[in-house]
Amino acid sequence: MKSFIVSGFFALALLMTACSDKPVVPEQLPNPVKTFIQQTYPGQTITFAQKDLELTGWKYEVFMADGTHIEFDTDDTWDKVESPMAKPIPMQLVPAPIATHIQANFPGAFVTKIDKERNGYEVELSTSMELKYNKQGALIEMDD
């Protein structure tokens, strides 16, 4: 019985590996993903998209013509946005308390990456400063 369970788990892992990282055309992206991109990056073109099979469902990764990389969780909401070459990401993606903290304490800096984490957000600034905030937007860690 143990070998059957182990074999089943191994087969499932192989199947997931075989199904992972499949390119998709932009038209095949879920509607919430397409809507987010159209509203947040109007006029930008998707150059590459793929879907990744996770245990909880499909995740999507999208690469824009300007180099922006966006990851979407299994519920089709953005999970991580990263801009290339120190280009600012739209501030509408940054929760208000975090945006206020950055503007007050890092004048002239802008957000080049934001990543939703289990307990809050990880933010990278144009100055290469990495900041971690809790879900309420309070700074909990800083690394330069």
Image (spheres, rainbow, N blue to C red):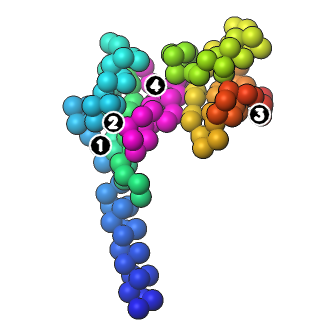
- Mark positioned earlier in the residue sequence (4 or 2): 2
Which residue is disc 4 drawn over?
68
- The CA distance from mark 3 to mark 4 is 27 Å
Placement of 127 over or under 80, stated as above or below: above
- The CA distance from mark 2 to mark 1 is 6 Å
Q: Position of residue 96 (x, y in %)?
A: 61, 17
Start-end of magenta stretch: 66-85
**Residue 119 visible in rendering:** yes
Which residue is disc 1 drawn over?
23
**What amino acid type is highlighted by mark number 3?**
Ile
Which quarter of the figure has residue 132?
Answer: top right
SS of the residue under disc 3: strand
- Mark positioned earlier in the residue sequence (1 or 4): 1
- Mark positioned earlier in the residue sequence (2 or 1): 1
Residue at image location 46% in from the left, 25% down from the top: 68
User: Which label is found at residue 140?
Assistant: 3
* Front of the two marks 3 and 4: 3
Residue at image location 75% in from the left, 28% down from the top: 139
Q: How many marks?
A: 4
- The CA distance from mark 2 to mark 3 is 33 Å
**What amino acid type is highlighted by mark number 1?**
Pro
Q: Is residue 34 left or right of residue 131?
A: left
**What amino acid type is highlighted by mark number 2?**
Ala
